[in-house]
Image (cartoon, grey):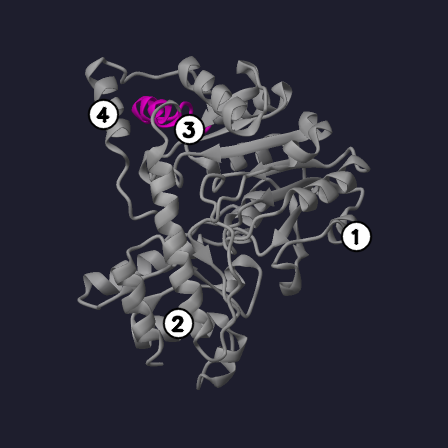
Amino acid sequence: MQYSLAKRVSRIQPSVTLAITARANQIRAGGGDILNLAAGEPDFDTPEHIKEAAIAAMRAGQTKYTAVAGTASLKNAVIEKFRRDNGLEYTLDEVMISTGAKQVLYNLCQALLNEGDEVLIPAPYWVSYPDIVLLAGAEPVTVPSRSENRCKITAEDLDSRITPKTKLLVINSPSNPTGIAYTQEELSALGEVLEKHPQVFVISDDIYEHILFRGQKFSNILNTTPSLKDRTLVLNGVSKAYSMTGWRIGYAAGPAALIKSMIKIQSQSTSNPSSISQAATEAALTGDQGFVKDMCDEFEKRHDFIVGALNEIEGVHCSQGDGTFYCFPNIEGLIEKTENVSDDVGFVEHLLNQAGVATVPGTAFGSPGYMRISFATSMEVLEGAFARFKTL
């Protein structure tokens, strides 16, 4: 049978990180020895008190549909989290729960964007941003950064890219893939530009908020420019900070009218997130936060090892990160000296085939000549991977 697919399918690409992880798993299943530094998934187990809350919810019969936007008790926990951690005040009609942070972004783009609208996405960027924009019929516009600015855009970079078609700016700090965070001064400068352009909405992707190193304090653009609150959506979730990737819960806060429209989108796509996962998330947000610090401390140790190891390799330069569990080394010198390899995509393929180490090419994040390495795995795996790396 012959049939044609929707044009929107041809506009987007599958997630590169998921594809590489699947490829690595396939090689491993066939007997290959693969060390996976591609997956953005903490290797820690979900804390016991969170799992126990899910079990208790099941035993209490909390296995039915909930409100599309999430249970009132979880929404109240989210409101308290924003007040406690971020100094931000929201009401119930300004908050919603979704099946992961990615769905929050999808809901936003479907509710806000029209055909021809432009979305500014600083590069390097998380791989899904451009494709979710394309699915909404809008146009992603890359805002390049510079290595001398630690892969962050400046106020001048932002101002030069805003046009009458600009509808949305994406800010992700700390960043996937770079691990770099914007300072309060940098966010304030971006905020000053945005104040001059009232048609531009902002999404602050704070999913790595709690994974910061060296005692740094987290800030987002509303902490520096509160005047933007009526056109900013703050996105977060529990996947990274609480090692709950499989539970699939994200949440957002923003203007009530926008949240209402996003709920309408969600009502006709996934409906409510899992009731059991919502109970677990409430326990995560309201319970003991010691796990988060312990995990972050371990990630900082891994970061220090991996950045030091990378910078010992000729042809590689890796900046110190501020947080997350990623680093984003420049490998242009290594590409030049590797036979039959001409770009970062080819080098990542070479590394997988010749050394059995899975990483992600920088091209997937809008930054050719780099690669992303995840240290969301054990020190044993990291040490083994770099022993192989040095044999190339």
Closer to the camera, 289 or 178?
289
Residue at 17% across / 67% down in the picture?
31
| Residue that carries the numbered disc 1 in the rendered image | 160
Residue 270, numbered label: 3
Q: Total marks drawn?
A: 4
Q: Is residue 88 above or below residue 183?
A: above
Mark 3 / mark 2, whichever is N-terminal = 3
Whether residue 117 sits left or right of residue 131 in the image: it is right
Query: What's under tag 4, amino acid-wise?
Result: Glu
Does the segment drawn in magenta span residue 59?
Answer: no
Q: Secondary structure at mark 2?
A: helix
| Mark 1–mark 3 CB contact (< 8 Å) | no
Residue at 54% across / 48% down in the picture?
131
Residue at 27% across / 15% down in the picture?
62
In 3D space, how far apart are the residues under numbered discs 4 and 1 (Cα atoms)? 51 Å
| Residue that carries the numbered disc 2 in the rendered image | 349
In 3D space, how far apart are the residues under numbered discs 1 and 3 (Cα atoms)? 38 Å
In 3D space, how far apart are the residues under numbered discs 4 and 2 (Cα atoms)? 42 Å
